[in-house]
Amino acid sequence: MRRRVRSSRRAYRMLALAALGLGLLVSGCGPQYVVLHPKGPVGQSELHLMAFAAIAMAVVILVVFVLFGIAVVRFRDYPGNRNPYTPHWHSHKWLEPLWFIIPAVILTVIAVPTVNVTYALAKLPPSKDPVVINVTSLNWKWLFEYPNQKIATVNYLYIPVGKPVLFHLTADSPMNTFWVPSLGGMEYTMPGRILPLWLEASKPGVYWGHSGQFSGIGFEKMFFYVHAVSGPKFTAWANRVRATARPMTLTAYHQLLRFNTIGAESYSSFPASTWPSVSHGFTLRGGMYLLKSNNPGATAQH
Amino acid sequence: MSTPAVSERHQSIPVEFADEEESIKITGFWMFLMTDMIIFASLFAVYAVYRSRTALGPTPQQLFHLGPTVLETLLLLTSSFTVGIAVWAMRHNRLRMVFGWLIATLVLGAGFVITEISDFVSYMSQGATWHVSGFLSGFYVLVGTHGAHVTFGIMWAITLLLQLRRRGLTAVTRRKLFTFSLYWHFLDIVWVFIFTFVYLSGKIA
Amino acid sequence: MPAFLLYLVHTLFPPDTRQPTELGADFMILVTGIGIVYILTRYKKWRWLWREWLTTVDHKRIAILYLIAAIAMLFRGGVDALMLRTNLALPNVQPIGALEYNEVFTTHGTIMIFFMAMPFIFALFNAVIPLQIGSRDVAFPRLNAMSYWLFAFGAMLFNISFVVGGSPNAGWTGYPPLTELAFNPGPGESYYFLSLLIAGIGTTITGINFLVTIIRMRAPGMTLMRMPMFAWSTLVTSALIIFAFPPLTVALALSLLDRTFGSSFFTLGHGGMPMMYVNLFWLFGHPEVYIVILPAFGIFSEVVPTFSKKRLFGYTTMVISLVSIMFLAYGTWVHHFFTMGAGPTVNAFFGLSTMLIAIPTGVKIFNWIFTMWGGRIRITVAMLYQMAFIPTFVVGGATGIMLSVVPADYQLHNSYWVVAHFHNVLIGGTVFGLLSGLYYWWPKMFGFILNERQGKVGFWLFVIGFWVTFLPQYLLGLEGMTRRMYTYPFGFGWHELNVISTLGAFTMGAGFIALVYNILWSLRYGERDLTGDPWNGRTLEWALPSPAPEYNFARIPVVHGVDEFWAMKEQGMTLANQLRPQDVKALELPKNTGMPFMLGLSFFVGGFGMVFEWWPIAIFGGLGVVACLIYAAFDYDDKEPLPADVIRHTEGTFGRLQA
């Protein structure tokens, strides 16, 4: 019996050590923890909320672990255990309701900011003129069309720093999700629907993005790169692409539809019919992630 | 479950529930009906979503003609009545009457299925196959699932007739007849929803 | 003729299934198959197999059949997992290519949920529930056998896909349009839809069966509020099953119609709408989460009181929380796709409903802790799994709450955080629970006790392996690694944690081997359970000999309260030497039948024909199904008399008859 007790204690100590080690690993958190080092306001507020929820949950975990630990240590069955043995104690008139109240209180604490931020993120920041980018996921590549700049790119994109970017997401392929973890959360690209998502970079840099939804054999190659540059540099880049790149014809688009993986491409223009429209049987009611009054592109585009 | 007043006066519970084991089977059959109900609920939900997704095909208003569906409604509602009489006869131990009304139910059911098939054939001959649009897919699957249930019910009724012929009215055959009637009434209710929700509202909207 | 053979070989064994792993699997199947046939023939066991097992309708034997299938599937799913982890250990190192990786992660998920967790749960339902509620069998013994064979043949259809034609490769959720013919022309996805449809019918029937069993067949005096908590969790699980599986059936059937018969539900054009599938799937999928976790809760509610030597704390609140989980489980499905643009209002609603469901779950955790409080805890393997469960599940629940925080979910969705979270609750909850239940009820099922020392070795390997595997995966999620990538490039900093995770996975594998070794060892050398009550149990199943005789109770007990058997023992009354010979009455037992097996086989043949669109075979299978149903309708010979003398003799050998 004694030996058994010691072995289980040792094991718990080992678990505690392992948890501590992993904790240190996170607190060291190098730059590869992209979600923990957001480079834009959307990712920032998502991280804040995540951290808040994590702390609240840590409280719960702590309470349960302490209670559980005490129960296990005090009430083990060994000869000479002097702690009270109450085999018929099976209910308590205020402890049991308390089990409902404690989690309810903690969850309310999390729920309030959750709802607030959920609504807040569904609104573009006011008075800032957003850059609109139409995103189409293809097998297995990303097509980015800039309707205002009249250019298109594949597998990379430029965005201006400090300006919200409104992405309209759709797919001419199975579903994917559009995710740039350094900037903020993901959203699905789905055939037949257009979902809006806004992100913003507050620091210049190159941020990688990837699809989060498995879409077939070339899925893991669906990386793309977001170059966040200053406003003038962005305009200069757009002008350069328009001046130097080749135009995208419908034939070129059909080549993109082939099931393969390719590198980055730039196009000085794109045919209007590549972006899904009502005539393609798309429902533009589609996504409502953004509040309707706040989604200028969705109506302006079509 | 409508228990006729007559049998209530004579005994406290209907005869098909008298045997403990058989009555447990009736409980089980109710549970089955619940799962079937969820299947139809899901199909109705699917249809509700797909109703407007007509793509290049016809809309409900262009497609449906109400004549055959009114006929189908009449046939099925009447058959629900006839199976009710069969159960009444079973409770009063009138085997010949059970036969007669069960066969009537079966014939009405067959009439329903034939009308529905000819209706479907006429839609399809206009090119309205389920490949054409999400709406047509949803329509054929919802209404077709119901039709398949009725067809299965007819086959069930035939085996039931054969069992009644061989064994007469026993605890087992009584329970089987009763569960069949539950099934049949259930299909009738589903049809009422199909008729109003699919055909009538499709024609009006 | 040669052309036909060539076609056959090309269809059944297309070039991409001629990889080393598939050929290895082919070889293993061949060797195992020949081995089984040889042993059965050598020892003239075919008759025995058919009479005693394939045609059985006894819930205790069906339980064993389920258990064998579940452990075999745990092995298959586990090997899949190890293949996945090996592939991910190092960046750009791929023992298996994308093609096979996609098949393997799909089969891993599908098998673990549908063909491991579900039958494992049904094994324990079957083994325990009739005994616990004081009944002679389930409500519908023949349907019970039918459920089993539909499940078994569904599982077989799914498993042969790996070597015949190619496995499904679109994930266990099978989202269209990836599963549509245009993007997935092979037979794999048809295998997926058909096998799940077939197994799903079986599961629905099981749900109906146990719901009716518990509602209608409890021993006299056992009111609902006197039922053991495992019976309560079975009741609630069954109710969840009968409401959750129909939407799945619809989702799968519509996908199959799209693939095989050209309808336009989830297609790219023609007004198809892939998101409808997602809704239907998760309308099933979220209740399914509770279908697999609630039985584990029930098991813990039996294990904790027994090994704490104390009555379950908060019986009423336990029931309240079970029932409220049942209702809330249907109101949370959208949290699987917050990022599909449903809008802030819908997302906020489902975020809150998800948080709400954590409350009753938390209640249960506190109640278990307070059951231990003031008790006398014996640390057996069953109890150890429970003790590992509480901290593990609390962490899994906490990370789940973080996912219900909608904006956080935008960053965590489909990342390794989600992978870590659901393994944390499914392994830390369901698998720990099932293993706890396995060690706890094993003596009742088989009549001998699994070795405790070996059990503890397996326990530590499994639990430590679990944490080493999945803690790093949380961090990988924060590093932005998305799920279902078959490999990843260097330079993202992902490789260190992936190596650790893979090492953990192999430790868990060692834990599984320890379990199997323990079973085989104990079969031969394990301590026999002669009393029928090896753990000093509290509920009625322990009042019976181990294993229970085929009629369970010679005389149905009358129940006076919660923990009836404990109360009997406190009054000094065990069932030994209690039964007066004149009280023994002749019984009727359900008679064995080959129909359920043939029905399952017909479904298998029909399904196989449909996968390859070989219509004559499909129609042949379909006719087989109809024939089985007609046979069942006319088969009135479903009872077998059991004379009182036989019962007296059996009870006598157990020493339960008054001298």
Image (tube, coloured by chain):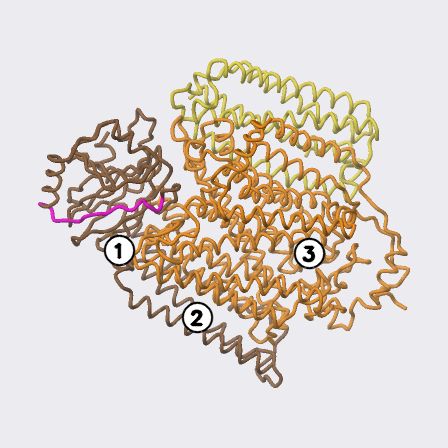
Chain colours: A brown, B yellow, C orange
Q: Nearer the viewer, residue C163 or B138?
A: C163
Extreme-front residue of the structure: C2
Residue drawn at x 31%, y 53% is: C489
Asked if residue A96 can be seen in this view, the reply is no
Residue B7, by quadrant, is: top right
Expressed as whole percent of the image width and height from the top left, the position of residue A172 reads: 33, 33
- SS for callout 1: helix
- Mark 2 or mark 1, earlier in chain: 1
Amino acid at dot 1: Ser
Q: Dot 3 corresponds to which residue?
A: C127
Q: Position of residue A183 (x, y in %)?
A: 24, 51
Label 1 Cα neighbours within 10 Å, binned few <14 / some 14-19 / many ≥20: some
The span from disc 3 to disc 1 (Cα, nearest Å) is: 51 Å
Amino acid carrying label 3: it is: Ala
| Dot label at residue A45 | 1
Dividing the picture into quadrants, the one containing residue C648 is bottom right
Asked if labels 3 and 1 share a chain, the reply is: no
Check the picture and name the quadrant holding the C terminus of chain C: bottom right
Mark 2: amino acid: Val
User: Which residues make up the magenta segment?
Assistant: A219-232
Is B41 situated above or below A181?
above
* Any part of residue B175 in sight: yes
Answer few, some or many: residues within 10 Å of disc 2's Cα (few below 14, many 20 plus, some between 14 and 19): few
A222 in magenta = yes
Query: Chain for mark 3?
Result: C
The residue at which mark 2 appears reads as A63
* Element type where label 3 sits in the image: helix
